[in-house]
Image (cartoon, rainbow, N blue to C red):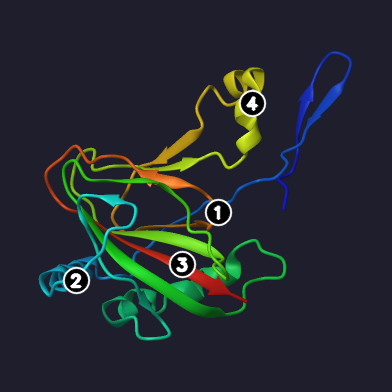
Amino acid sequence: MDLQPDIIKTDRYNICHQHLFQTPLFEIQTDHIDNEELSNLIYKMREDGGGEVKSNYGGWHSETKSSETGLDEFEGFFENTLDKILPHLPFNPPIQNVIEIGAWAMINNKGNYNILHNHISNNLDLSGVYYVKVPEGDCGSISFRDPRGSVYGNDFFFDRFCQKDAYRNRFPIEGLLYLFPTFLEHCVLPSQVDGDRIAISFNLTLS
């Protein structure tokens, strides 16, 4: 799905600037989720033990829970959230059903970060991250990498059109939800502050 072109008018010509191969990033500010209760549930998960190392350097990464075996603590988050968002996203044909959800929690503190990665795997369609708790200050932005790999071989375009920057950063806000395609590489920058940033990340299989 391409954006509408921009028209650049000169003295003689109209230049049609067409936006090809858009990569979607959907940002939703929610207002119906009890984040304090969700934080307490995630802290309880950590206290009960378990966890794993994936893309995280430091911090705590829970084991992945799925809708097939039971989302447990995450059930309340997904209830009445995805069904109010997914059908309105600009896909053709529209999203009809969520077939499967895989979700995990992350707790990052000062110095913790996540290395560059993507979520490509069989039958995974969209990824998401939801910010449950966000301390004041620079607690680590999520940073998305330009997926057009060959752009880095064109210095003229990379310097003048991309401003020599292959990354776009988004600062976490409590209650904010991002959805993006699983192929979009991303990382989380190191937190510079004391205090936990808690997020729920997930993958969706859709029809």
**Residue beneath disc 2:** 50
Distance between mark 1 and mark 4 Cα atoms: 20 Å
- Residue type at numbered disc 4: Gly
- Residue type at numbered disc 3: Asn
Which residue is most to the top? 11
Q: Earlier in the sequence, mark 1 or mark 4?
A: 4
Q: Earlier in the sequence, mark 3 or mark 1?
A: 1
Distance between mark 2 and mark 3 Cα atoms: 20 Å
Q: Earlier in the sequence, mark 3 or mark 4?
A: 4
**Residue beneath disc 4:** 153
* Residue density around tag 3, few if under 14, some if 14–19, many if 20 or more, within 10 Å: many
Location of the C terminus by quadrant is bottom right
Distance between mark 2 and mark 1 Cα atoms: 28 Å
Label 4 near label 1: C-beta < 8 Å? no
Q: Is residue 87 left or right of residue 12?
A: left
Residue at x 60% of width, y 24% of height? 158
- Residue type at numbered disc 1: Phe
Q: Find residue 88 and report its image quarter.
A: bottom right
Distance between mark 3 and mark 4 Cα atoms: 31 Å
Q: Describe the element under mark 4 as helix, strand or loop.
A: helix
Q: Position of residue 182 (x, y in %)?
A: 53, 58
Circle 2 or circle 3, nearest the eye: 2
**Residue beneath disc 1:** 183
Distance between mark 3 and mark 1 Cα atoms: 11 Å
Circle 1 or circle 4, nearest the eye: 4
The correct choice, above or below, for 192 with respect to 22 in the image is above
Q: Describe the element under mark 1 as helix, strand or loop.
A: loop
The correct choice, above or below, for 147 with respect to 130 in the image is above
Q: Which mark is residue 203?
A: 3
Label 4 near label 3: C-beta < 8 Å? no
